[in-house]
């Protein structure tokens, strides 16, 4: 006799403990196995693109660092590069170097947060998260020195950065450059060969290279599936052209590779910061740009490699002080396209692992 | 390598951290070090410098600065000062981005250095004119390179009077600038 | 074998009663003894919750609770007070009686376990001659209570949590019992008091595989990481006690931590020579009185529980089950056969033969480890090979 | 560097297959008639000279009398990129064919444009609102949606 089992539908609701921000997933379960998944967004939609149409170009900077609230420097950098390409502004070298230093520090912070919460979803009760947050605090203190705020930094302006780094910035920056590699060794010793972590993440949620490209995923998700594509290498902006660093590439595109790619990327960012420490020239940090400046009529698209993937801004200017249209290509939203395909057939405990390894930030998805 | 070696290595790392000093501090008793550029929430405002031009109100993305000025009979003449009736900053909606401080042409408005201004009611979160006048003058050095040159640090209680808070009046042009004949090539 | 001297001491104290009321003497002294020991467990559990939060915080380089009372020592009592004053909600979909019964059925077995554990030199409530069997019988009630709670609260998440719990607890009973049998064979009797006296050498040396299996099975029994599927907050919100609040939740919370304290006591008696000084034979000078040794060992085991909780992530339900049947069960069988062999060869082992048994046991343990690693190694590539650095860029 | 393909030589290459689909090409923007979009994109993806297999972004812009759709495409192998623009005249219920079965990446982006801009994508499997809640009327990003 066959026992009639009917699947139950549960809501991993917007206030679930382990969704990163407010993300709702309507999951149909047959026992433990996931049968159907339907993501529901929009809980954090603040209408950034509509707001941007009523703000001047400099005021939008404060809007951008509230999009992906874990990597606000990179959002600023993406927006500011797009505006400079639109208006044809040139940026002094020291400004470019300061932007790259701030961007790479923010990438380290974002990857630390991603790894910490990934382990938290796996059940390691807070210890790796606390270690990552302890290191994040040191970098946030650097941001406070640099621009006065820790998270919503709005440090960059069209034409460069708004103010040069204070004198006591450089010694503590040097201290972090020396202390972080030891911490990375410690985190790798804690996590990389941990058998339970291997069982829980190896071979779970595999994204094939072909479907990674078809679904236009970007950032660590794309690189973990074996495609060596990094905008800092393929389309260098600011000073990445004359810095040498590597890109970590995964082989089988599972959750473990995405986790490991982020850890190795932190080490690469440290290499970049080390080179910036030696190469940074002195001089002005910002070219002369009036507050309410009017870029020429036209449109342009520019994108950078943010910690989540390719973050791009498409700006249309009609000659006024505020853009006619400001579209944001958000990597987290597009990285979620293969979510359904990656989740089907796995157990509910794996759902958290796969979703955690995608490292999606709801502020950027819903904008 | 035996099977459980990864877990043992992890245990050794946690034990190593167990023996280290905790990295958190007891907040009200001991405080973390803050930096002069910290964007505090109690605004510092110099009445002597402020001409009531309200470019800060115009430039604030959220439009939360309310300035009402009136022709003050005797003082009003071309380019002089308006008489300020109200200068309210609604801290409840402020996001401390500092764009108003950036826009102030006369260095009258500065960000403060405190962050512990919590009130029971939202209406108490509006900074009226009198409070701006009477609040201690410890500006943060955000977007004020001249304060940084004086290595002014608001957290050591140094106050600054209105006269030496401003940018040097004349940007003395260097020789390369002098060479240019037309002003707009400079 | 002197009988239980605390009980005798209390009985003599109440001798002034007239002989016709001598039965009352038994009841009062018995009641006082059990009441005292039960309260000792309550206080120890409260202190254990405090210790857990402080030590866990130190593992995570934070401070932990230090506001309530000096160094935060009154924090657990503040927690209990808070939980009791919280409103006790019962969902309408819940089955009234079962929902009410579950916390009680969960707490009672934990206190029952105390009856058998000898705290110090002939300090125990009762010297049951089937002590080990009693422990096993009482811990199975916990599995039933968890399912009662999960099913009774009528909530989908709780149901999922409860069905997981029953499957896990039942399948971890088997290796736990087999590991216990090894200890019983070595000491010749099931009563815990005799087991402690029979341990000329701590049984952890004589039974390394047995200790490993018993330790992991007991961690699963107590729902502590890495097997804490029950309240896997990242998946099922809060597992079977989602719907409980107020005093009922306080009882569940108490039961979970009390079970950890009691199991620490059981580890100490079974494998670490209970209340004797573990490093020195019985008749030499013991530095501390016997009860201090017992509590020291308990705190040592509690520290290890917290240390594991701070480091290890959680296993998935099917991995937990396959670990029980594919790894712990065969290991406990090997341990059983090995102990049976050794006991038949040397029924009355002298000290040299004892050390010989220790060496044989350790050798077999290492052999199992190597075999198990080779069995797992061929289907798992080395972790660091999976990601390498590429300087060139481009795409497929 | 990612080379931006010159629209003129892309148009020359495509003229072989399509006579009237391509409207005009200036600098690196290729203007296309909206009803030829689907088969032209399919061609751009398949032929290995361009091999634009990475859909970077779809953007909708509301120019009061007409809607404009901008497709940013990229090829990871050749590292070159192309911008395709189409226009939908008129404001009431603009519609265009969905490119989901060429690039699955278009799924969420098209749903967002439908939700915020009101451009209907024919052939999209579940074209539902993504940002605003189900019962929301109107499309916020349109110029005539004055909020509230």
Image (cartoon, rainbow, N blue to C red):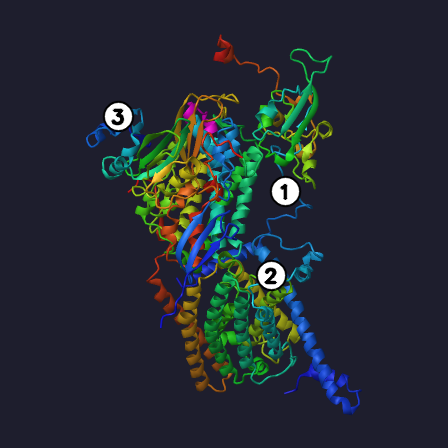
Give the side of residue C228 with respect to residue B90, left or right: left
* Discs 2 and 1 lie in a common subunit: no
Which residue is labeled 3 in the image? Answer: D8
Q: Is residue D104 above or below residue B133?
A: below
Picture quarter containing residue B38?
Answer: top right
Which residue matches tag 1? B32
C202 above or below A188?
below
State whether discs 3 and 2 lie on one chain. no
Residue at the bottom extreme, as displayed: C20
Q: Nearer the viewer, residue B110 or A20?
A: A20
Of marks 3 and 2, the one in the foreground? 3
The span shown in magenta is A85-96
User: Label 1: chain?
Assistant: B
Asked if the residue at tag 2 contacts the one at tag 3, i.e. Cβ–Cβ closer than 8 Å, the answer is no
Q: Nearer the viewer, residue C93 or A329?
A: C93
Residue A234 vertical position relative to residue A358 in the rendered view, above or below: above
Residue B93: in magenta span? no
Q: What residue is shown with label 2? A: C52
How far apart marks 2 and 1 lie (CA) works out to: 27 Å
The magenta stretch spans residue A93: yes
Left or right of B177? Residue A221 is left
x and y percentages locating residue C103 in the rendered image: 60, 69
Camera-side residue of C378 and C342: C378
On the same chain, marks 1 and 3? The answer is no
User: Circle 3 — which element?
Assistant: helix
Q: Position of residue B65 (x, y in %)?
A: 63, 28
User: Marks 3 and 2, how far apart in space?
Assistant: 71 Å
């Amino acid at each position: 006799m066959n026992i009639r089992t009917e699947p139950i539908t549960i809501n991993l609701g917007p206030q679930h403990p382990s969704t990163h921000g407010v993300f709702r997933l309507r999951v149909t379960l047959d026992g433990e196995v996931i049968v159907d998944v339907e993501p529901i967004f929009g809980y954090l939609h603040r209408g950034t693109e509509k707001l941007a149409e009523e703000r001047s170009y400099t005021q939008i900077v404060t809007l951008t660092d509230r999009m992906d609230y874990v990597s606000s420097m990179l959002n600023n950098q993406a927006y500011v590069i797009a505006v400079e390409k639109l208006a044809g502004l040139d940026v002094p070298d020291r400004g470019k170097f300061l932007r790259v230093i701030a961007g790479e520090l923010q990438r380290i912070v974002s990857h630390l947060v991603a790894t910490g919460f990934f382990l938290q979803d796996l059940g390691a009760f807070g210890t790796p998260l606390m270690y990552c947050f302890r290191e994040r605090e040191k970098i946030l203190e650097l941001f406070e020195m640099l621009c006065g705020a820790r998270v919503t930094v709005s440090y960059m302006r069209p034409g460069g950065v708004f103010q040069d780094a204070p004198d006591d910035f450089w010694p503590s920056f040097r201290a972090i450059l020396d202390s972080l590699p030891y911490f990375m060794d410690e985190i790798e010793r804690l996590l990389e060969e941990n058998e339970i972590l291997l069982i829980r993440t190896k071979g779970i949620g595999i994204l094939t290279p072909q479907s990674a490209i078809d679904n236009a995923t970007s950032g660590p998700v794309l690189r973990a599936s074996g495609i060596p594509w990094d905008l800092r290498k393929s389309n260098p902006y600011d000073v990445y052209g004359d810095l040498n660093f590597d890109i970590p590439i995964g082989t089988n595109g599972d959750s473990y590779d995405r986790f490991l790619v982020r850890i190795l990327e932190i080490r690469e960012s440290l290499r970049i910061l080390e080179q910036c420490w030696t190469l940074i020239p002195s001089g002005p940090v910002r070219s002369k740009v009036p507050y309410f400046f009017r870029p020429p009529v036209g449109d342009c698209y520019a994108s950078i490699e943010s910690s989540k993937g390719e973050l791009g801004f498409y700006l249309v200017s009609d000659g006024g002080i505020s853009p006619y249209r400001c579209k944001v290509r958000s990597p987290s939203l597009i990285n979620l396209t293969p979510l359904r395909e990656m989740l089907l057939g796995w157990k509910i405990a794996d759902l958290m692992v796969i979703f955690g390894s995608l490292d999606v930030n709801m502020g950027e998805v819903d904008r | 390598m035996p099977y459980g070696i990864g877990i043992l290595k992890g245990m050794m790392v946690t034990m190593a951290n167990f023996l280290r000093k905790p990295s958190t501090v007891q907040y009200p008793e001991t405080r973390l070090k803050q930096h002069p550029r910290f964007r505090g929430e109690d605004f510092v405002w110099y009445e002597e410098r402020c001409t009531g031009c309200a470019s800060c109100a115009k430039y604030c993305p959220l439009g939360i600065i309310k300035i009402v000025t009136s022709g003050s009979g005797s003082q009003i003449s071309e380019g002089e000062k308006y008489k300020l009736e109200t200068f309210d900053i609604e801290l409840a909606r402020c996001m401390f981005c500092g764009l108003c401080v950036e826009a102030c042409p006369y260095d009258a408005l500065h960000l403060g250095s405190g962050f512990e201004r919590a009130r029971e009611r939202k209406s108490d979160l509006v900074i009226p004119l009198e409070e701006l006048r009477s609040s201690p003058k410890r500006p943060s050095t955000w977007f004020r390179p001249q304060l940084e040159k004086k290595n002014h640090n608001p957290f050591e209680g140094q106050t600054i009077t209105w006269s030496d808070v401003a940018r040097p009046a004349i940007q003395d042009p260097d020789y390369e600038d002098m060479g240019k004949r037309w002003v707009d090539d400079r | 074998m002197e009988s239980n001297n605390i009980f005798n001491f209390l009985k003599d104290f109440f001798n002034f009663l007239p002989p016709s009321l001598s039965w009352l003497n038994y009841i009062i002294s018995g009641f006082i003894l059990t009441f005292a020991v039960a309260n000792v467990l309550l206080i120890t559990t409260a202190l254990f919750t405090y210790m857990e939060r402080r030590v866990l915080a130190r593992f995570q380089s934070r401070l932990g609770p230090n506001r309530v009372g000096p160094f935060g020592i009154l924090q657990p009592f503040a927690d209990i007070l808070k939980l009791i004053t919280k409103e006790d909600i019962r969902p309408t979909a819940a089955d009234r009686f079962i929902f009410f019964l579950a916390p009680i059925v969960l707490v009672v077995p934990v206190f029952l376990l105390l009856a058998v554990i000898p705290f110090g030199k002939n300090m125990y409530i009762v010297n049951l001659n089937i002590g080990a069997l009693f422990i096993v019988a009482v811990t199975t009630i916990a599995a039933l209570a968890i399912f009662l709670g999960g099913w009774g609260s009528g909530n989908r998440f709780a149901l999922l949590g409860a069905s997981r719990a029953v499957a896990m607890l039942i399948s971890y009973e088997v290796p736990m019992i087999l590991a216990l049998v090894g200890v019983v064979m070595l000491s010749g009797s099931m009563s815990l008091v005799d087991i402690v006296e029979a341990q000329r050498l701590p049984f952890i040396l004589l039974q390394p595989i047995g200790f490993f299996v018993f330790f992991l099975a007991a961690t699963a029994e107590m729902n502590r990481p890495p097997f804490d599927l029950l309240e896997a907050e990242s998946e099922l919100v809060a597992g079977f006690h989602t719907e409980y609040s107020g005093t009922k939740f306080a009882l569940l919370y108490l039961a979970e931590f009390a079970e950890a304290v009691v199991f620490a006591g059981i580890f100490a008696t079974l494998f670490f020579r209970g209340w004797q000084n573990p490093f020195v034979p019985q008749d030499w000078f013991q530095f501390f009185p016997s009860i201090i040794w017992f509590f020291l060992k308990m705190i040592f085991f509690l520290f290890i529980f917290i240390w594991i909780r701070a480091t290890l992530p959680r296993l998935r339900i099917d991995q937990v089950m396959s670990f029980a049947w594919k790894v712990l069960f065969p290991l406990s069988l090997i341990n059983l056969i090995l102990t049976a062999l050794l006991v038949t060869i040397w029924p009355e082992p002298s000290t040299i033969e004892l050390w010989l048994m220790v060496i044989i046991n350790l050798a077999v343990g290492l052999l199992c480890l190597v075999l198990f690693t080779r069995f797992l190694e061929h289907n798992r590539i080395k972790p660091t090979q999976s990601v390498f650095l590429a300087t060139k860029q481009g795409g497929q | 560097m990612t080379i931006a393909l010159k629209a003129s030589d892309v148009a020359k290459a495509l003229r072989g297959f399509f006579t009237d689909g391509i409207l005009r090409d200036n600098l690196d923007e290729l203007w296309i008639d909206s009803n030829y979009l689907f088969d032209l994109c399919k061609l751009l993806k398949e032929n290995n000279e361009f091999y634009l297999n990475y859909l970077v972004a779809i953007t909708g812009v509301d120019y009061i009398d007409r809607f404009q759709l901008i497709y940013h495409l990229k090829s990871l192998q050749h590292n070159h990129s192309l911008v395709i623009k189409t226009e939908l005249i008129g404001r009431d219920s603009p519609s265009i064919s969905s490119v989901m079965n060429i690039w699955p990446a278009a799924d969420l982006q098209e749903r967002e444009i439908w939700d915020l801009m009101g451009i209907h994508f024919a052939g999209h499997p579940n074209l539902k609102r993504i940002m605003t809640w189900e019962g929301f009327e109107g499309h916020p990003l349109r110029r005539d949606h004055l909020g509230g």
